[in-house]
Image (cartoon, helix red, strand yellow):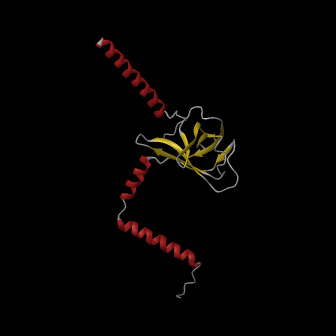
Amino acid sequence: MQSKALEILVGLFVCLGVAAIFVLTFRVASLDGVGGGSTYTVTAKFGNIGGLKPGSAVTMAGVKIGRVRAIEIDPETFEARVTLDIFERFDRIPEDSSAKILTAGLLGEQYIGLEPGGMDEFLRDGSELTLTQGALVLENLIGQFLAGQGESENDKLAEAIAKLADALTASKGPSTGEAP
């Protein structure tokens, strides 16, 4: 009798484990919004998409409003053209909104964050977001930081003084050669 109870307990434990793996799989794959209803399509071009993938979230103010449908190269500009599916219930997003590729969490999952603009006209099916900011690539930032470390403080000061002098002479206009 005791072995029968033990078998039932082990069976329940295995079922709970399978259910937990199923839920975890959908959370990690970001498929918790599958079947989110009807959508409209918007495109955006980015100079660098980093690790953005089809299926990544599109958010506004932290709220998921859609998904990345496709990513391809524009053959004319050689930029990444990203196609977004925005849920139909979010149909009042201003047309001059901007899109940024952001990073979430410790694993570095990338998504698109929209910031609303101020126009009275709204995005509709086939619209294109023109104000975009690509992904920040950590290697590029480190390279820029290290390149900046090679300059001495005197070089930086001399460069800043030269820029200030150029700005002042440009704002005065043509010089007459006479002292004021």
Q: Is residue 98 above or below residue 12?
A: below
Location of residue 128 in the rendering, given as x and y in whole percent from the top left corner: 66, 46
Q: Residue at x 40, y 69 (%)?
A: 157
Q: Is residue 145 above or below residue 24?
A: below
Q: Give the quarter of the image for residue 14.
A: top left
Q: Residue at x 59, y 79 (%)?
A: 174
Location of residue 28 in the rendering, given as x and y in whole percent from the top left corner: 46, 34
The quarter of the image holding the N terminus is top left
* Residue lying farthest to the top in this orientation: 1
The residue lying toward the viewer, choosing from 159 and 124, is 124
Q: Give the quarter of the image for residue 170.
A: bottom right
Location of residue 108 in the rendering, given as x and y in whole percent from the top left corner: 44, 41
Location of residue 94 in the rendering, given as x and y in whole percent from the top left corner: 65, 51
The residue lying toward the viewer, choosing from 61 and 110, is 61
The residue lying toward the viewer, choosing from 10 and 128, is 10
The residue lying toward the viewer, choosing from 14 and 108, is 14
Q: Give the quarter of the image for residue 63.
A: top right
Q: Residue at x 37, y 18 (%)?
A: 11
- The image shows a total of numbered marks equal to 0
* Residue lying farthest to the front in this orientation: 1
Q: Residue at x 52, y 76 (%)?
A: 168
